[in-house]
Image (cartoon, grey):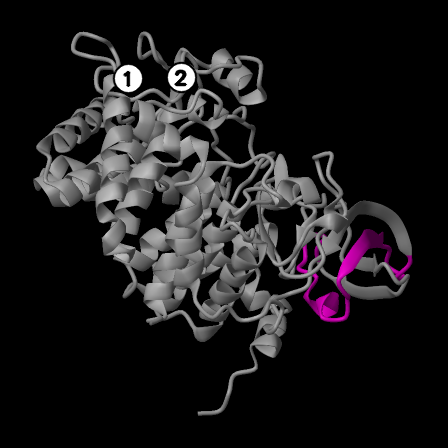
Amino acid sequence: MEKINFTEQAFNECCSAEFTPHPTGKTTKPFWNTSSYQFMYVPAFQFNELPGTKIYRYRAVDEKNVEHVFEADNCRALLTPIWAEIPEGVVNLRVYALDREGNEKYLIGARTFFRLAPFEEGLVPEVPSFKAAAMKAYDCSFEQPFIKHWFTDGTPDPDSDRYVYPSKMIAAIIDSMIELSVLCPERKEQAMKLATITADYLLASTPKTGHPMYGIPPTYKIDFRSNPETRNNLKAGERINTVMMIYPATVCRAYLHLEAATGDVKYFEAAKLIGEYFKKTVEENGSWCLIRDYRTGEKLTPNYCLPIQEIAPMCMEMYARTGDEAYKKMADGAVAYMEKTVLHDFNFEAQFEDMTVSTHYSNLSHYGASALARFYCNFYSDNEEKMAVADDLARYIEDQFCIWKRPAPFTRTQFDPSDYPTPCGLEQYDWHVPIDASTSDMVRTFMAMHKAGRGELYLEKAKTMAAAIVKMQLPNGLIPTHWMTPKHRAGAGFWPNCMFFATGVLSQLSAYLKEN
């Protein structure tokens, strides 16, 4: 079989109108990329038409001061005629309305953005064993205070402020320890002990019978901390009386996995309580209120959960465990909500426990789009219409959050993007920085797309992003969360859940590749 030139394929796809993520055409509906400032695939922009204009001229000047020009019959055309000519770098685009003689009569719009380089082969040295890298990270974790304290005291380390987000952290520990027990059976006893200790702590921290939020684990908790003045403590303290409803679903799934691994039915009973709350609070649109008052259950925001990330998978797992058709109905409703609202608008807003809710398109992230693409891969791989949407979503996350070579010099943060190691995955517009978990999320999405039969290029991208994670791994095995500066790459700003997510993805890729 002739070897595929993946570099050439990736370049051609990025320059083709057929492959551009979610083209919007001449619609008056707001474009999803209104706050975007980097593009890998051919973009189009929502400039306002000038009445009576028949032809528009597009002038794009690249960072080498070379001008690229084409004309179109509308002011929202894809830049396909010139995209292949434009090199990686900053681009200044101007669009003019022409008069009947072809003169540039009026400037009707301008946009500055960064033209990202597409995927290339050989960006990162090949990794001999992704499994070995995962095991090295697991070994390192057991030497860290954020893990050792559980074994000595049965409580979170008071000096580890990430545990102020207990549902997020503990669900990650539970699932990663179950993963470790399979990956390395000789570590099973230790891994399952940690999983049950952390799960039991969370159960003890959850409201009991009679409370409006009975059975719903806390999103925030600060009473164990030794220093209440850290950033995350302050964030959690501000929101201590609220619950972000994506996290109870994450915990429900972890409890189900733990029951399956241990046979202890109490974890299933805890999962059922969470599931029953979701049954009671599902909205007519098929989603759930994103933030509720943890004291009363009252809705606190008009924003809805992106239910495809954790809630729909939770419903499918509860349906498989119980046979209760109500969960299947909720999963179907969550998918329908995504398709009718989020997918229709393409507003994949970032939803994080330490960030504020956002307006349309102001703070997009890859997580919701990735989750929907994987859901289609897992349950609709034989449905070409849905899989075409999955391709579209995969290209969107690559277009906006994947850096293969140079990053854009623009950022909402205080960091210098020229110092970012690449390849890498960026998290969200408001924290558009390289994160191990974001890079890992791209690995698992590209891997799912390949598994669903969408082409070999996806697997090459998955392996390259995974190799980038291994490249960042420290000698002691720690996988740093943030990669923005030397200090961060040495472990500053570390989030345990992100490393556990990365180790899980590396081990899953190892199994998929059938590594020895």
x, y percent for residue 446: 44, 61
Q: Which quadrant of the figure contains the N terminus?
A: bottom left
x, y percent for residue 44: 66, 54
Instruction: Give above or below for 251 relative to 52.
Output: above
Image quadrant assignment for residue 247: top left
x, y percent for residue 185: 23, 55
Residue in front for this viewpoint, 95 or 275: 275
Q: How many marks?
A: 2
Q: Which mark is residue 132?
A: none
Residue positioned 80% across, 55% down in the render = 91
Q: Would you call the spot at circle 2 few (<14 residues within 10 Å), some (14-19), or many (20 or more)? A: many
Residue type, numbered disc 1: Ser
Mark 2 lies on residue = 221
Is 151 covered by the magenta stretch?
no
Residue positioned 56% across, 77% down in the render = 6
Q: Which residues are magenta?
A: 74-103
**Mark closer to the chain start, 1 or 2:** 1
Is 87 covered by the magenta stretch?
yes
Label 1 close to label 2 by CB (< 8 Å)? yes
Residue type, numbered disc 2: Lys
Say what secondary structure mark 2 lies in: loop
Q: Which quadrant of the figure contains the C terminus?
A: bottom left
Mark 1 lies on residue = 205
